[in-house]
Amino acid sequence: MNAPRTRVQRRPVHGVLLLDKSYGLSSNDALQKAKWLLRAEKAGHTGTLDPLATGVLPLCFGAATKFSQLHLDADKTYEAIAILGVQTSTGDLEGEIVAEKPVNLTPEQLQQVQLKFTGPIDQIPPMYSALKKDGKALYDYARAGIEVEREARHIVIHKLALEEIAPVNAQRRLKMTVTCSKGTYIRTLGEDIAVALGTCAHLSALRRIQTGPFGTAECISLEELEALPEAEREMKLLPVDALLDGHTPVTLPADDAGRFLSGVRRRGDWSDNLHVAVYGDSPRALLGTAHVKAGELIPGRLLSPLEIQSILEKALA
C-alpha cells in the first residue's frame, strides 16, 4: 500500500518571487510548485509565459496578489532564435512543417526590416494562443483544424535588434532581441519579420529577460528554491511594494492611516497623481495604492489589517 500523503500546512506568505521559469513548464504548474515549496496560502502570477519559453516570471504571494494586475501592463524584453526558411503550424518547434522557402538576405535588408518593425505596429494574434473567440481559446480551434478570423492588435516595439548568427544543420538563424508592449506575440513577430525578408521562419528558442523593472539576474529557479532549507526560501521574496515601481510614496500619520484603510479619502497638499503607494508611519507599513485628485487621496487597492500585521510580524522576527 502507498503511504498516506502528508498534508501541507499552509501559512500566510507575502511578497514577490522572481522565478526563472524552465522550458516545458506551464506558468500555472510553476506557480503551484512554488506555492507548495513556500507552503503559501494564496498565490498568483502577473501574466503567463508560454511553456516553451523560459525566463522571468514574477509570482505573487498573499497581499502581493492584490497588485499583480498592475504588472500586466509592463513592457517586456525577449531574446529569441528564429530558424529561417522553415515555417511550422505553431510558429515554434512543436508544430509540423507547413512551408519551406529559400533564404536570401543581406545585412542591408536586415537593417531595413529592423527599422520597419520598430515603433507602433499592428499584429494579428496567432491561432496557437490563449485568446478567446466565442468563449473558446484559439488554440482549441487550431487543434481542430479550424482557422478563425482575428482582429489585428495595436502593439509597440520599443527596441528591436536583429542579428544573423551561425547556422545549425545548414539552417540559417536569426537572433532577435525585442523590447515590446504587452500583448506582443514574439512567435508572430518572428514570422512577420521573415516574410518581410522574403522567406519564412519559426522560433527554436524564446527567453524573457526583463519584465518591468525585473531581470533574469534577480531570478531563482524552482530547483534552486527547492534546494534551499525551508527556513531560507521565504527570504528569496521581494517585498509586496516591489510591484509598485513608479508609484509616488505618500506616508500618513496613524489617525489618517486608520481612516484611509477604512476606505475614507484624506485631504492634503498633494499634487494630482494617478499612481500613489500609501504607507503608515508608525510603524512604517504599506497600506495600499491610491490616486490623488484635487488634493484628495482616494483609496485604490488596500491591504487588510491582518495582512499588514502579518507582514510587520515577519519583518520583526
Image (cartoon, rainbow, N blue to C red):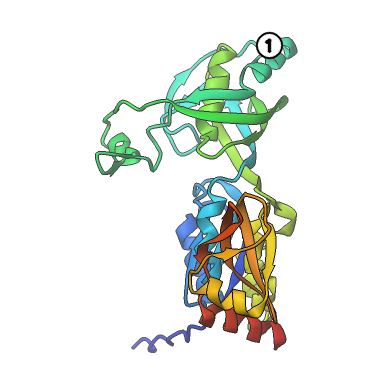
Q: Which residue is drawn at 53% across and 16% down?
A: 195
Q: How many circles with numbers are drawn on the protein? A: 1
Across and down, in percent, residue 84 comes to: 59, 22
Looking at the picture, tell me which residue is in the foreground, 280 or 20: 280
**Amino acid type, callout 1:** Gln
Across and down, in percent, residue 144 comes to: 26, 36
Looking at the picture, tell me which residue is in the foreground, 194 or 122: 122
Q: Residue at x 58, y 51 (%)?
A: 294
Across and down, in percent, residue 74 comes to: 59, 46
Looking at the picture, tell me which residue is in the foreground, 36 or 65: 65
- Answer with the quarter of the image where residue 279 lies: bottom right
In the rendered structure, the answer to whether residue 132 lies left or right of residue 202 reads left
Across and down, in percent, residue 155 comes to: 53, 30
Name the secondary structure under disc 1.
Answer: helix
- Residue where numbered disc 1 is placed: 109
Picture quarter with the N terminus: bottom left
Q: In this view, does 9 lie above or below 58?
A: below
In the rendered structure, the answer to whether residue 19 lies left or right of residue 68 reads right
Q: For mark 1, does the 10 Å Cα neighbourhood hold few (<14), some (14 to 19), or many (20 or more) residues?
A: some
Q: Residue at x 74, y 14 (%)?
A: 107
Q: Is residue 96 above or below residue 115?
A: below
Report if residue 105 is visible in the image. yes
Report if residue 19 is visible in the image. no
- Answer with the quarter of the image where residue 133 lies: top left
Q: Is residue 4 above or below residue 121?
A: below
Picture quarter with the C terminus: bottom right
Looking at the picture, tell me which residue is in the foreground, 52 or 214: 214
- Answer with the quarter of the image where residue 173 lies: top right
